[in-house]
Amino acid sequence: MKNLNIAVIHGPNLNLLGTREPGIYGAETLDKINKEIEQEAKKCGATTEFYQSNIEGQLVDYIHSCAGKIDGIVINAGAYTHYSIALRDAIAAVNIPAVEVHLSNIYKREEFRHTSLIAPVCIGQISGFGAYSYILGLHALLHALGQAS
């Protein structure tokens, strides 16, 4: 079985996890979430690479850099989910299977959060399970890549 390389991409404001609206996003820090994802991926025989930016163009550039070296993407694009055609196009352009994740249930929140521009170019979407959404997304991605976890 091939050792899969998974990119975990965090969008704007996720660097503030642990202090940013913990009632919505939870009390875990991004570093802690990344460590949990990394440990879970290792159990499943995968390696992880993490990237976070508050800048749309940097996220696009990072997605482009994944081509040829990353087998799958777990992405929480944050607010860019709802309006970034550039991120949508970047995911489509690299043709790497991606799973969209969100900490909160975006469908129980403001109306503008109910639309995802990136969902149509992802293999699936998971939201509403807090930090565990990332673990669920990782397992779903590995399953889709044929590395059942």
Image (cartoon, helix red, strand yellow):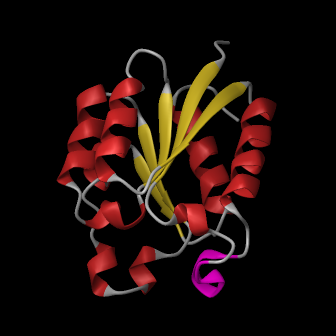
Q: Is residue 148 left or right of residue 120?
A: right
User: At 71% across and 45% down in the image, what residue appears?
Assistant: 37
The reply to whether residue 146 is in sight is: yes
The reply to whether residue 143 is in sight is: no
Q: Position of residue 91 (x, y in %)?
A: 30, 38
How many marks do you count on the picture? 0
In the picture, residue 66 is in which quadrant?
top left
Residue 105 position (above or below residue 97): below
Q: Is residue 120 left or right of residue 3?
A: left
Q: Magenta segment, which residues? A: 20-26
User: At 24% across and 58% down in the image, what residue appears?
Assistant: 117
Residue 18 position (above or below residue 126): below
User: At 74% across and 24% down in the image, what residue appears?
Assistant: 45
Q: Position of residue 139 (x, y in %)?
A: 63, 43
Q: Quadrant of the N terminus?
A: top right
Q: Is residue 86 left or right of residue 35?
A: left
User: At 28% across and 47% down in the image, what residue appears?
Assistant: 87
Magenta includes 25? yes
Q: Position of residue 64 (x, y in %)?
A: 33, 29
Residue 128 position (above or below residue 122): below
Q: Is residue 23 left or right of residue 122?
A: right
Residue 77 position (above or below residue 144): below
Q: Position of residue 73 (x, y in %)?
A: 48, 37
Magenta includes 94? no
Q: Quadrant of the C terminus?
A: top right
